[in-house]
Image (spheres, rainbow, N blue to C red):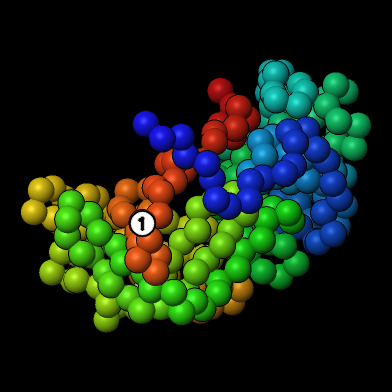
């Protein structure tokens, strides 16, 4: 099998890297403020994106209960805490970094993303995970034709696209809906979110004469302003369908998986 060489930039930040967060970071749970800080730090626990580290002094008094457990995490040891707000209790919601962690985050607290109901950078809500300051996402209009095929069936044949280039991910080609073969598209109830693009408004499985492929295409009808040109357009996973760019078959990229941090769901 031919070795696949990525044709897009990879992540550049090493695990354990720490940087200041030049934004006000707030977190709310059960409709109550948990923390409010302008002194947060980023720490990278894997190269894809960082974790926020919140100074203990900027967390609401009494919100954290030490569980008496120490976790061995990727960049150091930490004490596990329960988030306690009146009758709301969320065990394993946070961990306080110990003395063997990078010096700039010792004594700071990181929270499991799902334990906080709403995260804010300044006054804008952030979804899924912190935005990586080293990630760039561009949505560029392109006059190069894109044909999408699977099992010999033409799923889309478009004279142009909006090309989305995102650090660390394969290039995606968003196509006008008039150029898709909708007789092969079956809507599903799937919804995914992206901190850079927003929440999907539609997913479709694709039916060929040979098989049905679940959740092969998606759309953002109301994307973030940074990628507004993709609004209403449809993209296909080029890991799972053949894409021809100006008539040239592109190699299928390796399947993209989101790495699971050791401390994302500490036991």
Counting from the top left corner in percent of width and height, residue 98 is at 83, 25
Compared with residue 143, is residue 197 higher up or lower down, i.e. above or below?
above
**Above or below 215: residue 63:** above
Q: Which residue is mark 1?
A: 249
Q: Residue at x 24, y 50 (%)?
A: 214
Q: Is residue 16 visible?
A: yes
The x, y position of residue 114, in whole percent, is 55, 45
Q: Residue at x 69, y 20 (%)?
A: 71
Towards the viewer: 31 or 148: 148
* Vertical position of residue 14 compared to residue 162: above or below: above
Viewport quadrant of the C terminus: top right
Given residues 2 and 254, the one toward you in this image is: 2
- The x, y position of residue 231, in whole percent, is 45, 77
Crowd band around label 1 with a 10 angstrom C-alpha radius: few (<14), some (14–19), many (20+): some
Residue at 44% in and 74% down: 144
Vertically, is 31 above or below 223?
above
Is residue 86 shown to the viewer in this render?
Answer: no
Q: Is residue 96 left or right of residue 260?
A: right
Judged left or right of residue 3, residue 124 is right
The quarter of the displayed image where residue 46 is located: top right
Q: In terms of depth relative to the viewer, which is nearer, 113 or 247?
A: 247
Query: 144 or 100, which lies in front?
Result: 144
């Amino acid at each position: 099998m031919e070795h696949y060489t990525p044709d897009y930039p990879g992540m550049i930040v090493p695990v354990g890297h720490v940087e200041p967060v030049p934004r006000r970071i707030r977190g709310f749970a059960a409709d109550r403020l948990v923390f409010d800080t302008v002194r947060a730090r980023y720490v990278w626990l894997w190269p894809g994106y960082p974790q926020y580290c919140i100074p203990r002094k900027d967390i609401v008094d009494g919100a954290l209960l030490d569980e008496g457990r120490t976790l061995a995490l990727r960049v150091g040891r930490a004490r596990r805490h329960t988030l306690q707000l009146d009758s709301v209790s969320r065990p394993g919601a946070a961990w306080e970094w110990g003395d063997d962690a990078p010096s700039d985050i010792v004594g700071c607290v990181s929270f499991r993303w799902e334990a906080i109901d709403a995260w804010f950078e300044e006054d804008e809500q952030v979804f899924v995970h912190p935005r990586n300051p080293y990630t760039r996402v561009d949505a560029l209009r392109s006059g190069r034709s894109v044909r999408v095929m699977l099992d010999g069936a033409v799923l889309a044949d478009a004279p142009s696209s909006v090309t989305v280039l995102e650090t660390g991910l394969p290039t995606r080609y968003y196509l006008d809906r008039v150029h898709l073969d909708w007789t092969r598209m079956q809507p599903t109830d799937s919804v995914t979110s992206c901190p850079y693009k927003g929440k999907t408004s539609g997913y479709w499985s694709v039916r060929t004469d040979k098989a049905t492929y679940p959740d092969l295409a998606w759309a953002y009808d109301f994307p973030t302003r940074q990628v507004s040109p993709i609004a209403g357009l449809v993209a296909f996973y080029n890991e799972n369908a053949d894409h021809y760019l100006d008539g040239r078959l592109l190699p299928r990229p390796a399947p993209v998986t989101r790495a699971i941090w050791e401390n994302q769901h500490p036991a």
